[in-house]
Image: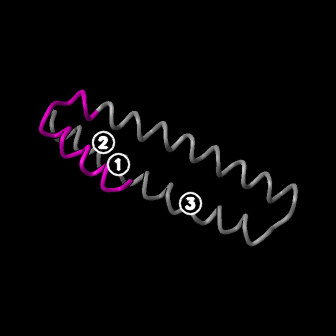
Amino acid sequence: MAVFIKRKKFLALEQNRSELHYLHDSLSQELIRINSELRNIEYRINFFGVTDKLLEEKKEILIFANWLKQEIDETFQTLHKNN
């Protein structure tokens, strides 16, 4: 997935700003979905108790969410450089 996003950013830079806006919006929507999954896992941990599986899922989601936030920040900075 990371290769796809980097390729998409590269193509967006070559094409126009609207592509960057679209990419930024898409990444933001994905981050919202990831945060929803994280809340769901935290609810399950509170309701059912901590299990190794839930902790592993939470860890993976947090890693992905942090990476996604970095991609959003890079896209946002690129948008403002091109203005």
Of 79 and 54, nearer the camera is 54
Work out whether mark 1 precedes mark 3 in sequence or the reverse, and give the earlier one: 3
Q: How far apart, in angstroms, are the residues tagged by discs 1 and 3?
A: 16 Å
Would residue 31 appear left or right of 72 to someone viewing this image?
Answer: right
Percent x, y of residue 46: 83, 57
Q: Which residue is mark 3?
A: 62
Q: How far apart, in angstroms, are the residues tagged by discs 3 and 2?
A: 21 Å
Q: Are marks 1 and 2 in contact (CB under 8 Å)?
A: yes
Q: How far apart, in angstroms, are the residues tagged by discs 1 and 2?
A: 5 Å
Q: SS of the residue at dot 2?
A: helix
Q: Residue furthest left?
A: 14
- At label 2, which amino acid type do we have? Phe
Percent x, y of residue 66: 47, 58
Q: Which residue is mark 2?
A: 76
- Around disc 1, counting alpha carbons within 10 Å, would you say few (fewer than 14), some (14 to 19), or many (20 or more)? few
Q: Residue furthest bottom?
A: 52
